[in-house]
Image (spheres, helix red, strand yellow):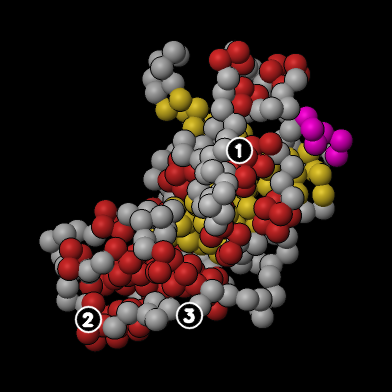
Amino acid sequence: MTPLLEVRNVRKVFGGGKSDTTVALEGVSFSVSSEHPSITGIVGESGSGKTTLARLMLGIIGPTHGYLFHRGRDVAAMSRRERREFRLEVQPIFQDPFDVFNPFYHVDHALAVPIRHFKLADSRREVQRMVAEAVEAVGLRPSETLGRYPHQLSGGQCQRIMVARAFLIQPRVIVADEPVSMIDASLRATILGSLQRLNRELAISVVYITHDLMTAYQICENIIVFYRGSIVEAGSVERVIRSPKHPYTQLLISSTPLPDPKRRWGEDAIVEEESTRRSTSGCKFAPRCPSAHEPCWTTVPSLCRTDADRAAACFLCSDGPVLENEEINQVFAPPQAENAPTLPEAN
């Protein structure tokens, strides 16, 4: 079955000169199924390539090498009609909700424009009804929200308006780039719960991009761990978070703050020692890895299957079969059952 959205062997390089370039993505592949709506987490520290991947999946930027396919069609070679279909089916939710709104328009504008653009309503009254229903669906009251400017609403309200926009358009894929990182903790469960309901009730797949492993563990079925633009571990979120194989994934999990006043935050951090600051043409994590040995510096480790639902790119895990980039989805867990637990309802 042709995937709904597929990133295939993508490499993205920024900069013009040979000595002044940044490789943001390197050999990245994965796909979103057209049959089984899922929530897939993309995690990693700042600078790991997560936002570059989000912008590429949305068609905002193109790959330096490799392809982005929508229903088997190369997005870069799409006709105007095909690109319109792509825009309808692949929608974003960005990190900063205030950056999305035009400050000179009421927030209603962000909801009404896509309805008119994609011809989802036949009359002005129908537009108003759809907007009001979408706002209510994410736990907001139309009387307290519509008709206001962005600066008159909180960050949480503005972000829920963007979730309402996705509810209105009902795309097949939502690319959510750090959607709760600028939101108060009290509202995070509400917004994440809304994403879960979009997934389960409207069959919308979500690519959830975050640096927060705990929220990824809460809502995702599968997870992909990035380090400096490359995939180092991937699989079911239960397997990867509870029993990480790659040293970098172990570092991320051990760096998560715990409610223990006797444990100093960051005491387990792995830093790059002066003695190990050598160039590497092999594993990018070698300068920070406590288990690095000579092959790590000269050879790029392959992505190897360690379990039925997990693969890792590390010489410590190289006993299993090698997966080609395009085969990464083979280690993803099957879709969750309809009665799986969800976060609290929006209110």
CA distance for labels 3 and 1: 36 Å
Residue annotated with mark 1? 268
Classify 10 Å Cα crowding around label 1: few (below 14), some (14-19), many (20 and above).
few
Q: Residue 166's spot in the image, x, y percent?
A: 41, 68
Q: Nearer the viewer, residue 83 or 340?
A: 340
Instruction: Name the residue located 69 percent from the left edge and 36 percent from the top edge.
Output: 247
User: Residue 316: within the magenta?
Assistant: yes
Point out the frontmost of discs 3 and 1. 1
Looking at the image, residue 7 lies above or below residue 335:
above
Q: Are marks 3 and 2 in contact (CB under 8 Å)?
A: no
Classify 10 Å Cα crowding around label 2: few (below 14), some (14-19), many (20 and above).
few
Q: Residue 340's spot in the image, x, y percent?
A: 66, 76
Where, by quadrant of the figure, is residue 130 drawn? bottom left
Residue type at mark 2: give it. Answer: Glu
Residue annotated with mark 2? 144
Q: Residue 66's spot in the image, x, y percent?
A: 56, 35
Where, by quadrant of the figure, is residue 138 drawn? bottom left
Going from the N terminus, do you reach mark 3 or mark 2 first?
2
Considering the image in quadrants, where does the C terminus appear?
A: bottom left
Q: Nearer the viewer, residue 324 or 237?
A: 237
Whether residue 222 is visible, yes or no, is yes
CA distance for labels 2 and 1: 47 Å
Considering the image in quadrants, where does the N terminus appear?
A: bottom right
Where, by quadrant of the figure, is residue 111 drawn? bottom left
Identify the secondary structure beneath mark 1.
loop
Q: Which residues are magenta?
A: 315-320
Identify the secondary structure beneath mark 3.
loop
Residue annotated with mark 3? 345
Residue type at mark 3: give it. Answer: Glu
Looking at the image, residue 300 lies above or below residue 325:
above
Going from the N terminus, do you reach mark 2 or mark 1 first?
2
Q: How many marks?
A: 3
